Image (cartoon, rainbow, N blue to C red):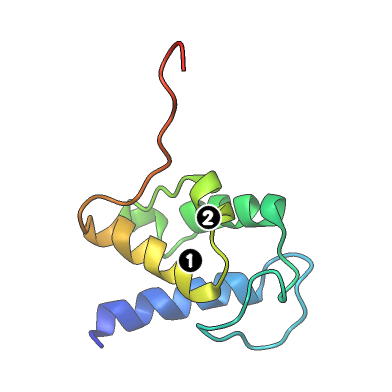
Amino acid sequence: MAEDEEEIEDNVLRLIETAPGRSGDEVTYEDSLADLGFDKQSLKELAFAINKDEYFKPLGVGLIPDDVADCETVGEVVELVKKELNNDDMPARRKRPGPGK
């Protein structure tokens, strides 16, 4: 794994571990976000925390809160951040219905 990818993972894990309402337990890539105490609203708040974080903000991370709220595992959040940073096939952003849909 590249050093940059490891830093990205470490920083996402740091933010998840320090999220409000979370216990101090260390999290792993495979952990279920629901099991860690996250619900849709707290995942949306996590998106804002990632976007404003001193590590991610200078990198231009701009996650869509609803996309983060759709994640089920810690690994999915990490992959979403990586896609945002690498622009791999453009991130799978939520499609907004157009007028009349």
> Residue at point 71% right, 64% down?
38
Q: Is residue 11 above or below residue 49?
A: below
Mark linked to residue 68 = 2
Mark 2 in CB contact with mark 1 (< 8 angstroms): yes
Query: Where's residue 2, x and y in %?
Result: 23, 84
Q: Is residue 63 left or right of residue 85?
A: right
Q: CA distance from mark 2 to mark 1?
A: 6 Å
Closer to the camera in the image, 60 or 68: 68
Three-letter code for the amino acid on which mark 2 is drawn: Val
> Residue at point 43% right, 12% down?
99
**Occupied quadrant, residue 3:** bottom left
> Residue at point 53% right, 83% down?
30
Badge 1: residue crowd in 10 Å (few <14, some 14–19, many ≥20): many
**How many badges with numbers are in the image?**
2
Q: Earlier in the sequence, mark 2 or mark 1?
A: 2
Element at badge 1? helix
Query: Where's residue 81, x and y in %?
Result: 39, 62
In the orientation shown, which residue stands out farthest toward the top? 100
Closer to the camera in the image, 66 or 57: 66
Q: Is residue 26 above or below residue 15?
A: below
Give the quarter of the figure containing the N terminus: bottom left
Badge 2: residue crowd in 10 Å (few <14, some 14–19, many ≥20): many
Three-letter code for the amino acid on which mark 1 is drawn: Val
Query: Where's residue 63, x and y in %?
Result: 44, 50
In the orientation shown, which residue stands out farthest toward the front? 101
Element at badge 2? helix
Q: Is residue 3 left or right of residue 66?
A: left
Mark linked to residue 91 = none
Query: Where's residue 44, x and y in %?
Result: 61, 50
Label 1 sits on residue: 77
**Occupied quadrant, residue 23:** bottom right
